[in-house]
Amino acid sequence: MIPYLDLPAQYRSIKPEVDEAVQRVLASAQLILGPEVAAFEQAFAAYCRTSDAVGVNSGTSALHVALRACGIGSGDEVVTVPFTFVATVAAIEYAGARPVLVDVEPGTLTMDPSQIERVITPRTKALVPVHLFGQPADMDPILEIAHRHGLRVIEDAAQAHGAEYKGRRCGSMGDIATFSFYPGKNLGAFGEGGAVVTSDRDLATTMRLLRSWGEEHRYEHRLKGFNYRMDGIQGAILGVKLRHLEAWTEARRSRAALYDRLLADAALRTPVVRDNCRHVYHCYVVRTANRDQLRQTLADQQIQTGVHYPIPVHLQPAYADLGYSAGDFPVAEAAARDVLSLPIFPEMTDAQVEAVASALRVPVQA
Ligand SMILES: *Cc1c(COP(=O)(O)O)cnc(C)c1O
């Protein structure tokens, strides 16, 4: 069996360090926030090349806190994409604002900058590009449009820890960036977790307040906040795992390069990588008209795959009230039909990559 990812293997590779970190937290009983979370925040801010990081309890909470720190609420509009995990759109509604969607680029499947200006209105307050699958969105034109219209930019970097755009780290380009530490993400907690990063000290202060009841001093609430605090155990484990992230990212990139080579002559499209970018391959996504059939062929050979994502957000029943319909975002809709995520994880062996590639090179009946 070739799993889609192998979290037990990752734990085995760093078990003494993780166990020691957990023991430290149990012994100190600093179970919520505390010194381990503070130390991780500092290390993660440095990793993202920002001044501040604020640990929270999920990537979704990170998005909500980021939007609220920008003052976004009822009556406002926030522009994002339909081809993303549903949380990006959900968090905009949590903040009380209206999600306005624009299509993605055909190659990278990230926000298409040429679509943004048509949807900007006097109510637009922010752009939320998603660095999908670990590849940066085209930030230069996105930042330029935001600057020209006085909009905030919040990067959804849930899949893009350590990714780079023209030498800049994902997370350091917008006003704020949000990360998820869901276990399957490139940097994963042993449970839920997330963070916001920024180099704006005022936004950082606001987000620190918002994640913990807006409490400035004990039982003194300056802002209406949330219970979005990070657990001490997660902070301690994330601190350990962050030290391995660069090596894990390079391992992902070398697995991806091997797939690229082995699949060069296969009847499918390998990932399009933007020039001057560091793709961190949260997902290695190929595209083929025979997606469902190919997925079954692989499943028959005990090879697990994923589909990210089979239904774009604007066609989800839950989001029918956004008022979009089929045909509104043709690039996202085509991608939803033909994307297939192959197994990729740092511990994956060359032999496993080769086995997946040879299963894919078998001609598929039309
Ligand atoms: C995982 C993810 C989120 C949500 O993160 P959680 O930690 O699961 O709440 C948001 N946006 C994107 C693009 C994601 O992949």
Image (cartoon, rainbow, N blue to C red):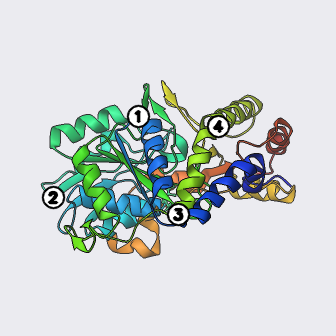
Image location of residue 214, percent across then percent down: 26, 67
The residue tagged with tag 4: helix, strand or loop? Answer: loop
Q: Who comes first in sequence, dot 1 or dot 4?
A: 1
Residue 296, image x, y percentages? 78, 59
Between 254 and 57, the one lying in front of the other is: 57
What number is the disc on residue 49? 1
Say few, some or many: other residues with alpha carbon within 10 Å of mark 4 (under 14 / 14 to 19 / 20 or more): some
Mark 3 Cβ and ligand 1 under 8 Å apart: no
Amino acid under disc 3: Ile
Specify the amino acid type for callout 1: Arg
**Considering the numbered disc 3 on the image, is that residue within a helix, a strand or a loop?**
loop
Q: Which residue is mark 2?
A: 123
Foreground of the two, 2 or 340: 2
Q: Nearer the viewer, mark 2 or mark 4?
A: 2
Sooner in the amino-acid sequence: mark 2 or mark 3: 2
Q: Which circle marks residue 270 in the picture? A: 4
Q: Secondary structure at mark 2?
A: loop
Residue occupying image coordinates x 41% and y 54%: 329
Real-space Cα separation, disc 3 to disc 4, in angstroms: 21 Å
The percent coordinates of residue 8 (x first, y second) are 76, 56
Q: Which residue shows up at 74% across the image and 51% down it?
A: 15
Q: Which tag, 2 or 4, sits closer to the chain's start?
A: 2
Decide which of 77, 250 is in the foreground and name it: 250
From the viewer's perspective, is residue 285 above or below residue 6?
above
Of marks 2 and 1, which one's residue comes earlier in the chain? 1
Looking at the rendered image, the disc whose residue lies closer to the viewer, 2 or 1, is 1
Please tell me the numbered disc located at residue 311: 3
Q: Residue furthest front?
A: 28
* Residues at marks 2 and 1, CA–CA distance in whole angstroms: 31 Å
